[in-house]
Image: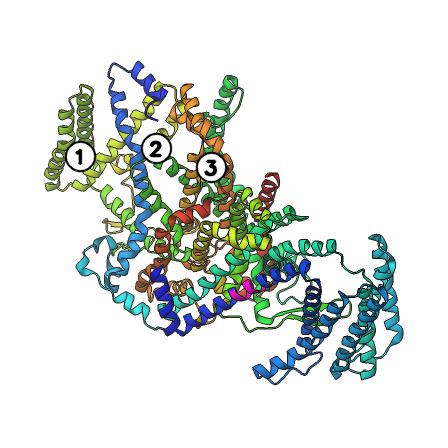
Amino acid sequence: MGIIAVSLAYGFIFVPKIRSTIILAVAAVAITGGLWIGANLLFDQATKRWAAFNAARFGLTAFAITGIISGNRLTNDGGNGEFFSDLVNWIWLPLVIGGIIAAVGFFLSGLTERTPRIALGTLGFGTAGAIIGALLQESVRPETDIVVTLIWTAAFAALGAGISVLRQHPPLGGAMNGGAIGWLIGSFGAVDLGTGSVGWAVVASVLPAAVIGARIGMTAPATAADRNEVDRRARPIIFIGPAVLFLTTMLVIPAIRTLYLSFFDRDSEDLVWFENYIETFTDTTSLDLSGFWDAFFNWPMRIGLILVVIFISVGKKMKDRTGKWVELGSPSLGPLVLGGMFLAFAFFTTSRGTIVNNLWWVLVVTLVSTSLGLAVAVLADGAKFEKAAKSLIFMPMAISLVGASVIWRFMYVARDSSKEQTGVLNALWVGLGRLSTGRGVAATLLIFILGLTALAMVLTAITKKQWARALAIVVLAPFALWGAAWAWAQLGGNAQRIIVGFFVSLCFAALLTAVVKAVQRKEYGAAAVPTIASLLLGWFLVRYWGIIGGGVGGFETNPAGNVVGSPINFIQESPYNNIFLMVVLIWIQTGFAMVILSAAIQAVPDDVLEAARVDGATTSQVFWRVTLPQIAPTIGVVVTTIIVLVMKVFDVVKVMTNSNFGTQVLANDMFNQAFNAANTGRGAALAMLIFISVMPVMVLNIRRMQRED
Amino acid sequence: MSEIKLAEDTAAESTLHNGGVISRFMDGFRAIPRVVLWFIVVVWATPTVGLLISGLRTRDDQRSSGWWTGLNPTEWTFENYDTVFGASASGSLGDSLLNSFAITIPATIIPIAVAAFAAYGFAWIDFRGRKGLFIATVSLLAIPLQVALIPLLQLFVGGAHLTLPIIDKTITILPDLDLVNTTTAVWIAHCGFALPFAIFLLHNYISGLPKDLFEAARIDGADHFTIFWRLVLPLSVPVLAAFAIFQFLWTWNDFLIANTFAGTNPDARPTTILIANLAGDFGRNEHLLPAAGFVQAFFPLVVFFALQRFFVRGLLAGSVKG
C-alpha cells in the first residue's frame, strides 16, 4: 500500500496526465458521493423539518427545469464562449426561478386553509411563468393562435381527467394538469416560433404555470403519515437510482437504439427493414453453405456414422441391462458423444463464412476449455504443489487477449524451410520430421525389438520383486541402446531418433497394458481413454518407425531428393487456422473453468462420496455418477459464461490475422462495418445478431434467478 | 481418504494377489495423472516464458533462432525495452501506460461507489418491484458490448438530442461535451458496462450479511443511510477489493472499448492499442513486441499474483451453488 501511495504522490506532483486523472477521478467520486449523501440527508429532513424539505424539493426541481430551458438557449443568447460569463449567463435565471418556487414551497407547508394555499400557488407559479415568458428569446416566441392552443388544451384536459377517473381520483386535478400540458404543447409546439409578440409569450407562459400552481395548492397539506411515506418511498430511489440511471443510459437505451438503427441503411436515413439481416445471411463471406452436400461423403461423416452404429449396439445392450440407452458413466456415452462430434465436424468442414466461424468458436472453445478445466481440477485435487500448478494455469487470465494473441503469434511463427524455425510449434514439428526420417525399416525394427526385450526384462524383475535388478535394467537400457545406436550411427543411423522412439514405444506398451487390464475387469469406461490414446500413439509409432509412410512430422522431399523441413503456416492455412486462433482463448479460459469447477468439486459433501465408496464404487464410477451430477449446475454456469465471452471475442482475430485468411468473426465484422466502412445499418444488424445469439443465455440466467427464492 | 481403501484396490488385491505383473505395474500408473497434470502446466506456462525471454534478446537473435536457444543470460540485453519506452511513430509505451492508468483508476473506483449503493438497496430495502428490477439489472450481464457501442459513440460525438415527435422540435438533453477520443469517454463507458457484474457481485455478498446486525442497528434508531455508511461498507471491504481487482484487470486488458472511443487519438491510446498497432505493423517492429507485451502484462500479473485470493473469490461468487 505504501508503494502505491508514494507512486501516486509522485505522479500527482510531477506528471500532468496523472494529476489530471487523479483530480478527475476524485472529483467524480466526490460529486457522486456528495450528491448521494446530500440526497440522503435531504430526505432525512422530510420527517423532521417539513417546511425546509418542501422548499428544497420544490426549488431544486424548478432549478433543474429552468436549467434545461436556459441551457437550450431559450431565454438567453448563448454567451460569448468565455467560461465564467457563460456560466453566469446560464445560471442566473434558474437560480431566481428556483428561489421563487422554493419560497412557495416553504410557505405552502405552513398554510393549512385551502383558499390561501390555492392563492399562493397560483401567484407564485404564475410569477415564475411570467418571468420566463418575458425573457423568451425572439426566435422562440410563439405565434398567436388561440384556436389551436385551445384545441390542444381541451384534448389534454380531457385526457388528464380520464386518467384521474381511472385512478379513482376526482377528475378536476387531472383536468388541470392535462390542460396545462395541452396549453404548452398547443401554444409552443403546434405553431411557428419566432414570429410572436412578447405579450403573447408572457400570456402563453403564465397561464399553464398558474394552473399548475393552483393544482399544487389544491393538494391537502401533508400529515405526519404522508411525510413518513415520502421518506420511505424515496430511499430505494436514492440508493438504486444512480445505478439504474447509468445502466439505462449506457446499456438499455443504446441497445434499443441499435435495434432501431439496424433497420436503416448505412447512413441511417432510409428505412430498409430487414435488408441488413438478409444481406448478412446471403453474403458468401458471411455464410457459405455451398459445400453442404459434400458433407455426406467426407471422412468425418463416415467415422461419425460408424460411431453412431457402435452407439446403437452398445446402447441397446445397456438398455437391456440398466433400462437406459445412455447415462453418465456408461460405455454408450463415449460413442454417442464422439459420433455426434464427428458428424458436426463433417458439416463444419464443408461450410465457410463468418457465421460458421462463430459457431466453430463457440463449440470448440467451450467444449475444450470446460473439459480441460474439469480435467485439471480433478487431476490437481490433492496433488503436491496443487496451488502452484493451479496458479500457473490460471495465470493467463491476467494477460490481455491482445497480449495473449501476441504471445501465441510468436509460438506459431513459420519460416521458410531453409531457415531455422523460431516458433516453438514449428520447431517441434520440423524437428519431429527430421527425427522420424532417420534410417530405414530393418534397423529400426531391430532397435524396436531390443527395446521390447528390455521392457519385458524390467517387468519380470518387478514381478519377482527384484527391484534392484529392475532399476538397473531401466537405468542401463537407454545407455545400452544408445551404445548400440551410436554404433549404428557410425554407419549413418540416427541416435536421437532411436532414444525418443524407445520412450514413446514404452508409453505405448504401458497404454496397451492398461487397456488389457481394464477389459479384463470389464471396466469398459475406464478402458476408453487408454484405448483412444493407444490407437493414436500406435498410428504415430507406425509412421515414426517408417513401417508405413516415410516418417511423421514436418518434412518433405524436394526435387533434388533431399529431405527438408516443411513448416506449417498455422495462421494462414484456412480453414484450420481458426482452430489455432481458438487455442489462444482456450489458453486463457481453461484457468477460469478450472478455478470454478475446482471449487465446485471441493464443495461436494464428503459423506456422499464416502457412502458411494462404501457401496463399492470405483474411483471412476464415483466421479461419473456421483461428483459429476452434483456439479452439473456449476458446469452450466461455466459453459454459459464462456459462450457469452466467445461470441464477443474481437481482440484475438484482430491482432492475429485482422480478419484475413477466412478467420472473420461477427464481432470483427461488426466493428469493420460500423466504424471502418461507416455502414451503420449493417454494423447495427451484426451487433443485434450477436445479441440474439446470447439471448438464450440471458433467458436461462433470468429463469435461474427467478427460481432462486 | 486413505483410511478407507478404494473398492478397486481391494478387488485388485484379492483377484490378482498372485503378485501378477500387471497389478504391480499398475501401481506405477498412479503417477500418470500427476505426470499429465505437470505436462499441462508446462504447456500452459511455456508461451509466457517464451515472451519474457524473447524480449531480452536482440533483434537479430530473435529473427534467426528460437528463444530456447537463447537461454544464456550473458546474451540478454535491455535494448528492446529502451526502444519501446522512447517515443516513436506509433506512440511511446510510457505515454500509453499513463493512458492505461488514466482509464483504469476512475473505471475501478466509480462503479464501486454506485454499485455499492444499489446492491444495498436491492438487498435490504424492501420496495415494490424490487425482485423484478434486480433480475432486469443482472440480466444485463449477458448483453454483449457491441450492442451499445454505436449509439454510445454517437452520444459522445454529438451529445444527446431528443426530437419530440408530434411537435417536431429538438431539445438537447446532454450537450456535446467534446469527449470523444479522450480517455474520459473510455472510462465512462467502462463504468456503465461494469455495473451489472458489480451489482451482482456486491449484492451476493451484502445480502448474505447477518440480518440481526441490521435489526439491532434499526432498534438503536439508525436509518438505511447510517446502516449503509457505518455497518455495510466496512464489512464489505473483501468483496469490494475482489471487484476492484477484477475491474482493474478487465479495464487494463480491454481493447475493444478503448479502440472504439479513443482509437484515433494517439494521445489517448492505452497500452493494448499500442501493442495491437505494433503487431499490425507488417513485421517491421516485431522484435519490440515481446518487450512491449511483457510490460503490458506486468502490472496485471503483479496484481494477480499478489491478490489472487481476492480475484478467485470474485470469480466464485455466485458461480458455485451451496
Residue range (magenta):
A30-35
Describe the element under mark 2 as helix, strand or loop: helix
Crowding around mark 1 (Cα neighbors within 10 Å: few <14, some 14 to 19, many 20+) is some
Residue A206 appears at what percent x and percent y? 81, 75
Mark 3 near mark 1, Cβ–Cβ under 8 Å? no
Name the residue tied to disc 1: A443
Q: What mark, if any, has residue A342 been given in the picture?
A: 3
Which subunit holds the residue at mark 2? Answer: A
Task: Report if residue A412 is visible in the image.
Answer: yes
Instruction: Work out how far the residue at label 2 is from the one at label 3, CA to CA, in angstroms.
Output: 17 Å
Instruction: Work out how far the residue at label 3 is from the one at label 1, CA to CA, in angstroms.
Output: 38 Å
Please tell me which of labels 2 and 3 falls first in the chain: 3
Name the residue tied to disc 2: A533
Of tags 3 and 1, the one toward the viewer is 3
Which subunit holds the residue at mark 3? Answer: A
- Determine the image quadrant of residue B177: bottom right
Magenta stretch secondary structure, dominant: helix
Residue A103 appears at what percent x and percent y? 73, 72
Q: Is residue A240 left or right of residue A604?
A: right
Please tell me which of labels 3 and 1 falls first in the chain: 3
Crowding around mark 3 (Cα neighbors within 10 Å: few <14, some 14 to 19, many 20+) is many
- Determine the image quadrant of residue A248: bottom right
Residue at the location (58% across, 54% down)? B118
For the image, the number of numbered tags is 3
Please tell me which of labels 2 and 1 falls first in the chain: 1
